[in-house]
């Protein structure tokens, strides 16, 4: 995970948002599964965004996930190897926690932030910004985590 030029990222926003619109049916299914796991919505949900970059994807997901989980407390954890990008991300999600780490170090980096065995419906992982650049080692680190 490396940083990209900010002007290039800004130019991509309308195109990225249009592409994210295609994920709304998947977001609906995820929200339904989360609601089924905790119909009362009392248990906080932690959303981990791998490859969070400047937080544009997480901000979009927050905007569209929050109404699908009314009254649910949602905590955001933004993970990226590029610290300057995460500093920008906190402008979009001021209450999010950030972790600067390489994906290969993910299990150790998240150990203090996630329960060893999360209760169903308490954890959601998104990594749409990096899916196309994951190495085999990255995938193994994510699965181990």
Image: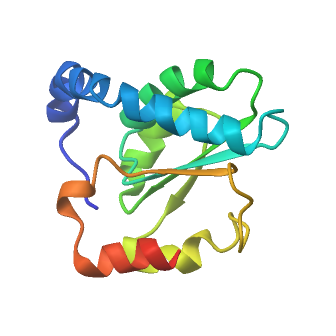
Residue 61: give x, y in percent of width and height: 46, 30
Side (left or right) of 131 relative to 34: left
Residue 62: give x, y in percent of width and height: 53, 28
> Does 20 sit above or below residue 141?
above
Foreground residue among 58 and 119:
119
The residue sitting at 75% across, 30% down in the picture is 72
> Does 26 sit above or below residue 140?
above
Residue 13: give x, y in percent of width and height: 24, 24
The residue sitting at 27% across, 26% down in the picture is 22
Side (left or right) of 33 relative to 102: right
Foreground residue among 127 and 41:
41
Residue 64: give x, y in percent of width and height: 49, 22
The residue sitting at 24% across, 79% down in the picture is 136
> Does 40 sit above or below residue 70?
below
Side (left or right) of 48 relative to 122: left
Quadrant that contains the N terminus = bottom left
């Amino acid at each position: 995970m490396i940083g990209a030029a900010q002007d290039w990222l800004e130019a991509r926003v309308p195109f990225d948002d249009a592409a994210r619109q295609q994920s709304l049916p998947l977001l609906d299914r995820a929200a339904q599964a989360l609601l089924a796991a905790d119909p009362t919505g009392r248990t906080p949900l932690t959303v981990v965004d791998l490859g969070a970059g400047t937080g544009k994807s997480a901000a979009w997901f927050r905007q569209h996930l929050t109404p699908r989980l009314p009254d649910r407390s949602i905590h955001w954890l933004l993970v990226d190897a590029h610290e300057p990008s995460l500093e920008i991300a906190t402008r979009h999600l001021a209450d999010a926690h950030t972790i600067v780490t390489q994906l290969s170090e993910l299990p150790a980096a998240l150990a203090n932030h996630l329960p060893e065995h999360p209760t169903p419906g308490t954890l959601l992982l998104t990594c749409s910004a990096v899916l196309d650049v994951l190495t085999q080692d990255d995938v193994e680190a994510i699965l181990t985590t």
